[in-house]
Structures are given as C-alpha cells and as structure tokens.
Image: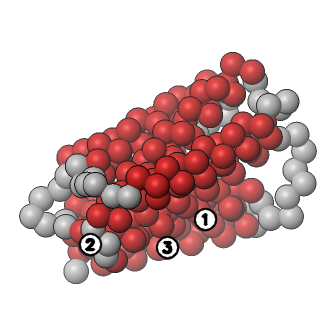
C-alpha cells in the first residue's frame, strides 16, 4: 500500500512539473523537480524484494543530485550536473552489465551505430553555439548514456519480458531527453512552439519512471 501512495505522490509531482513547463511557470517546476527522482527512489525502496540494489539506489541518488544542480544558472552548475548524471549512467551500466549475456553481436553493433550517429548529430548541431571546451565532454556524456542503453538492450535480448522492455524504453527516453537538453542548452533564441523544458522533462520523467518500474518488475 505504501508504494502505491508514493507512486500517487510521484504522479502528482510529475503532473505539476509538466504543467508548470507547459505554461512556463518556473516556480512550479522549481518546487516539484527535486521531488521526482526522490519519490521514485522511495517507490523503489518500498517495492523491491528481497532487498534494494545498492548500486541502483546510488544511480537514482546521483540522478537526483544532477536534477538539483541543473536548477542553478551558470556553466559551472551545468558541468556539475553533467558530472552527476554521468556518474548515474556509469552506475546504471554496472547495474545492467551484471545481467548481460551473449546476444547477437550484429544487433548490438547496429544499435550502437544508431546511438553514435545520434550523438554525432547533436554535437554537429551545437558546434557553433556551445563553448568549445564543452563540446567534446558533452559528446562523451551522450555516449555514456548510449552505452547504458546498450547494456539494457543486451539484458532485454537475453531475458525478454515486461520488466526488461520497460527498462529499455525508459533508457531510450532518457537518451532522448539528454539529446534535447544539450541541443537547446546553448541555442540562441527560442524557435520552439512548445517549451523545450516540457519536452525534456516529459521524456526524462517518464524515462526514469519506466527504468525504476522495470527494475522492480525484474526483481
């Protein structure tokens, strides 16, 4: 019962967060953003059996810290948030690598090339707008997210099921969110019809939920 109460609180916080982004009320976003991953962490702890995975818990904690750091303005905060999220991806890689088994190499290579191409496209698009010293680190960060996706894919292929499918769907959304975030972070002007933060937070929030729910389902 407790985990469903926490999930309901998460749904409420996520709704307020997305509505705040849609109508561009930053105060609503600022209040609810730190709540999202912290509630997912509590949801995981309340629902996991027989006991929590310490590395996955640390990955969620690092994601929460990244959320908080990115709320502040300035390149320094942006770098600090990126380091925190990169740490989360490394911890997620460790989490999912433990489930990796032999799968068709061609599939992994093909998907790897897709993630590599997506990363290259984002780096190409920001090449004239982002500070030059940050371009390579941001590209490496996206590759780190892509590697995390590949390990989830290997897990899905070796143990197909609802849990692994949800986890991979969440990982893909996390990657999309990061691509959009990096693309718009240094973009001059605001040509988007829809607030870019709404797109970022929709894909990120849903992605984190699916990853957490998928991990719970796999036991």
Q: Is residue 99 left or right of residue 21?
A: left
Q: 156 or 16: which is nearer to us?
A: 156
- Frontmost of labels 3 and 1 is 1
Q: Residue at the spot x=27%, y=68% of the render? A: 159
Label 1, residues with CA under 10 Å away: few <14, some 14-19, many ≥20: some
Q: Which residue is mark 3?
A: 12
- Frontmost of labels 3 and 2 is 2
Q: Is residue 22 left or right of residue 13?
A: right
**Rendered view: 23 above or below 66:** below
**Rendered view: 130 above or below 116:** above
Q: Which residue is mark 1?
A: 202
Residue 219 locus on image (x, y percent) = 19, 67
Spatial CA distance of label 3 from label 1 is 14 Å
Residue 102 locus on image (x, y percent) = 28, 54
Spatial CA distance of label 3 from label 2 is 22 Å
**Circles 3 and 2: CB atoms closer than 8 Å:** no
**Rendered view: 197 above or below 163:** above
Q: 94 or 183: which is nearer to us?
A: 94
Disc 3 on helix, strand or loop? helix
- Which disc, if any, is residue 159? none
Q: How many marks?
A: 3
Residue 14 locus on image (x, y percent) = 53, 67
Disc 1 on helix, strand or loop? helix
Tell me, yes or no, if residue 31 can be seen here.
no
Q: Which residue is mark 2?
A: 217
- Which comes sooner in the sequence, label 3 or label 1? 3
């Amino acid at each position: 019962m407790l985990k469903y109460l926490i999930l309901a609180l998460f749904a409420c916080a996520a709704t307020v967060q997305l509505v705040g982004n849609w109508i561009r009320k930053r105060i609503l976003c600022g209040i609810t953003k730190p709540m999202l991953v912290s509630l997912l962490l509590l949801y995981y702890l309340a629902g996991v059996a027989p006991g929590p995975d310490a590395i996955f818990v640390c990955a969620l904690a690092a994601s929460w810290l990244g959320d908080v750091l990115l709320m502040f303005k300035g390149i320094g905060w942006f770098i600090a948030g990126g380091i925190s999220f990169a740490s989360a991806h490394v911890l997620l890689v460790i989490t999912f690598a433990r489930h990796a088994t032999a799968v068709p190499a061609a599939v992994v290579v093909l998907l790897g090339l897709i993630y590599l191409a997506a990363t290259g496209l984002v780096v190409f698009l920001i090449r004239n707008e982002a500070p030059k010293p940050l371009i390579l680190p941001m590209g490496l960060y996206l590759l780190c997210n892509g590697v995390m996706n590949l390990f989830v894919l290997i897990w899905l292929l070796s143990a197909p099921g609802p849990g692994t499918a949800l986890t991979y769907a969440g990982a893909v959304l996390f990657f999309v969110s990061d691509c959009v975030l990096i693309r718009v972070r240094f973009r001059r002007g605001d040509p988007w019809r829809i607030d870019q933060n709404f797109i970022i937070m929709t894909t990120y929030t849903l992605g984190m939920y699916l990853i957490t729910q998928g991990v719970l389902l796999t036991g």
